[in-house]
Amino acid sequence: MRRDVWVFLFLSVLLFLISSHSIIIAVVVTSNTSSPYSSQRPSPASECDALLQFSQSFTISRDASADYCDYPTNTSYPKTASWKNGTNCCSWDGVTCHMSKDYVIGLDLSCSRLRGALHSNSTLFSLRNLQRLNLAGNNFTGSPISSRFGILTGLAHLNLSGSSFSGIILLEMIIHHHSNLISLDLSVSLIPFYLSDSQYLTIEEDRSFRRFISNLTQLRELALDGVDMSRISPSSLTNLSSTLTSLTLDVCLLQGTFPINIFRLPNLRILSLSDNSNLTGALPQTNWSSSPLVLLSLSFTKFHGPIPDSVGNLTSLEYLHLKGSEFTGSVPPTLGNLDRLSSLALGGLNLSGTVDFDMFARLKNLEDLYLSGNLNVMLPNNGNCSFPRLKELILQGVNLTEFPYFLSSSEELELLDLVGNKISGPIPEWFGRVWSNTLAYLDLSSNNFTGEIPSSICQLSSLRDLELLDNRLGTIPRCFGKLSNLSYLSISSNNFTGEIPSSICQLSSLRDLDLSDNRLNGTIPRCFGKLSNLSVLSISSNNFTGEIPSSICQLSSLRSLYLSDNRLKGTIPRCLGNLSNLLFVSLF
Ligand SMILES: *[C@@H]1O[C@H](CO)[C@@H](O)[C@H](O)[C@H]1NC(C)=O
Ligand SMILES: *[C@@H]1O[C@H](CO)[C@@H](O)[C@H](O)[C@H]1NC(C)=O
Ligand SMILES: *[C@@H]1O[C@H](CO)[C@@H](O)[C@H](O)[C@H]1NC(C)=O
Ligand SMILES: *[C@@H]1O[C@H](CO)[C@@H](O)[C@H](O)[C@H]1NC(C)=O
Ligand SMILES: *[C@@H]1O[C@H](CO)[C@@H](O)[C@H](O)[C@H]1NC(C)=O
Ligand SMILES: *[C@@H]1O[C@H](CO)[C@@H](O)[C@H](O)[C@H]1NC(C)=O
Ligand SMILES: *[C@@H]1O[C@H](CO)[C@@H](O)[C@H](O)[C@H]1NC(C)=O
Ligand SMILES: *[C@@H]1O[C@H](CO)[C@@H](O)[C@H](O)[C@H]1NC(C)=O
Ligand SMILES: *[C@@H]1O[C@H](CO)[C@@H](O)[C@H](O)[C@H]1NC(C)=O
Ligand SMILES: *[C@@H]1O[C@H](CO)[C@@H](O)[C@H](O)[C@H]1NC(C)=O
Ligand SMILES: *[C@@H]1O[C@H](CO)[C@@H](O)[C@H](O)[C@H]1NC(C)=O
Ligand SMILES: *[C@@H]1O[C@H](CO)[C@@H](O)[C@H](O)[C@H]1NC(C)=O
């Protein structure tokens, strides 16, 4: 699969995680509002003044909010902009006071476009009665997480995720006496590929982390995604409280063996450990039936061993992501009992045996399914097998010999990848009708498709990526020009003959066009010059004649140009030298 698809899949998981956090955080009701923590009675005026000074230590900037605040929907706005000196802060946006109105117990400035350093002398730390603090999704420009958080001894909920903190965290210091902590989220909600060392948060020292974990007897949610935990032994998680409902440690550089007892924690609903490529472990083979798990993600880890049949007892499960891990054995048919399942990713690992599609017949909530590898997938012979909510289907190299016709009832399909099977015959004609507004990604490469590409494919108005390489297809439909969102088109290594229809030049979004290794003839269309976004053009190994048109020089974004193995003649246009992005050219 292409790298951007992996990135896409990864982002989907990340977005899901971010949204699931916020759901969970919203679900936790306001905790005990009496104030057992403060010895001297605080005055509302001093609390309000501290808040105002705190807000004045930042600038408000539209682009200071983390990306997830505004994607997919805009949620960021400057909450502190409406705060006014002289008014009672208990009515300020984001501020919650104790019912006596004497002191502040909650501050939620998530996604408030704050930018600036959060120093240890901040007046924030004089709000001694805070029970909930949420500063997620701002930009504290690489400030360290101050150990002064430790004096906010009443904190039950602390969320500093996605706020550009950095440096080494001694959790034991920050959460010093906080054995009443209920939720802690320090996730670095950034795309990990772009993290630089200086942006990393690192948890220091295993022994203190171990003490920290053992002391949190009421902990329900712990999220440290993107935090460097390479100095922490996963065994220090063994003593996590049985109150835990959510543990997410994606992309944490964890190494070693994950403690198996965590899977059996009686309240655990979310467990996500993906993208820890040195983390090993196994799933419980026995006594794993009453778990309320909703999400289990072990993708891109070294978890290994069989997937136990008892996974079918996890009746709350909605997301099961094991892709790119090292599980072996067969796909347990008991998965078919999980009728809440919406996302099942078992691709990119070494499973074997037969998967009879009929076993999924009950999974009416299925939205995405990914299988690949040595599996032998038997398509349903039962007409009741329909998946009305299916959005993404990836069945790579699983020995399919015919097209999955049951898909005609999945009207919301956005991504279909059937690469590397043995499907023969024509591409079904009903594609364009059923998925005219939904299908964005279609990859049928490395099969045995023959005949013409049906012209109904031109009705796929959302199509961005069309890959049909390595089949035996002929004739490019003249209507192709209607696919106005198409940015990637590859039909190489097929049996296409005749001339390139000039309608291809209407594909103004096209970035990558690969027609190589066919039997196309005629001249290179002059109108190619209109494809102004084109970055890669490959028409090598065909039967093109004539000269290279100088209109090619209008393709100012062009990076790679492959024209070799044709019957072109004449001179190389001098103007090619003006294409400043051009890195690779093969002409003859
Ligand atoms: C609130 O806190 C007080 C003092 O710690 C405790 O006695 C009481 O049971 C708590 N109430 C609730 C609803 O948790
Ligand atoms: C708020 O107003 C009072 C009285 O005018 C003033 O003393 C105080 O410094 C102001 N606080 C801030 C943070 O501006
Ligand atoms: C707070 O500390 C920072 C860095 O140590 C310093 O630059 C700043 O002046 C201090 N602010 C106040 C109000 O003392
Ligand atoms: C945060 O702000 C700093 C300073 O303005 C900037 O260099 C950095 O790129 C910002 N970080 C993010 C994630 O936007
Ligand atoms: C838990 O925290 C309390 C209060 O700081 C401390 O007295 C106790 O020693 C801690 N327990 C452990 C196991 O660290
Ligand atoms: C995994 O472990 C190897 C060998 O110890 C190390 O070189 C590599 O950086 C580690 N990778 C990650 C992502 O932790
Ligand atoms: C759990 O699954 C196993 C294997 O599928 C089954 O034999 C057992 O009865 C199930 N237990 C419960 C409590 O559902
Ligand atoms: C693929 O299917 C064919 C016929 O259906 C079967 O003979 C073959 O063993 C299958 N291959 C694998 C890897 O299961
Ligand atoms: C491709 O399909 C043809 C019939 O259309 C069949 O004869 C041939 O064996 C198929 N090739 C493969 C690799 O499945
Ligand atoms: C390629 O197309 C020609 C007709 O243009 C047809 O005769 C031939 O059988 C096709 N070859 C394959 C391998 O499908
Ligand atoms: C292109 O090939 C087709 C047969 O595939 C032939 O009929 C046509 O004359 C050729 N055109 C050119 C310009 O060579
Ligand atoms: C290329 O075109 C020439 C002349 O039309 C023809 O003789 C030759 O067979 C064609 N080559 C291929 C690979 O189609």
Image (cartoon, helix red, strand yellow):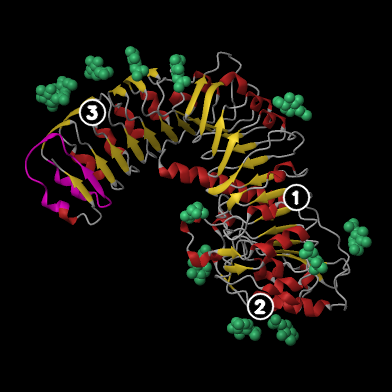
Circle 2: is it few (<14), some (14-19), or many (20+) Cα within 10 Å?
A: some
Q: Is residue 266 above or below residue 545?
A: below
> Is the CB of mark 2 within 8 Å of ligand 3?
yes
Q: Nearer the viewer, residue 457 or 427?
A: 427
Residue 174, given in percent of the width and then of the height, sits at: 70, 69
Which residue does the numbered mark 1 point to in the structure image? 244
Residue 449, given in percent of the width and then of the height, sits at: 35, 21
Pick the quarter of the image with the C terminus: top left
Indicate which disc, 2 or 3, sits on the residue closer to the N terminus: 2
User: Quick check: can you spot residue 84?
Assistant: no
Q: Residue furthest left?
A: 570
Circle 2: element type = loop
Which residue does the numbered mark 3 point to in the structure image? 518
Rendered residue at 29%/27% (across/down): 478
Residue 39, given in percent of the width and then of the height, sits at: 88, 76
Quadrant in which residue 282 is drawn: top right
Residue 535, given in percent of the width and then of the height, sits at: 29, 47
Q: Nearer the viewer, residue 345 or 102?
A: 345
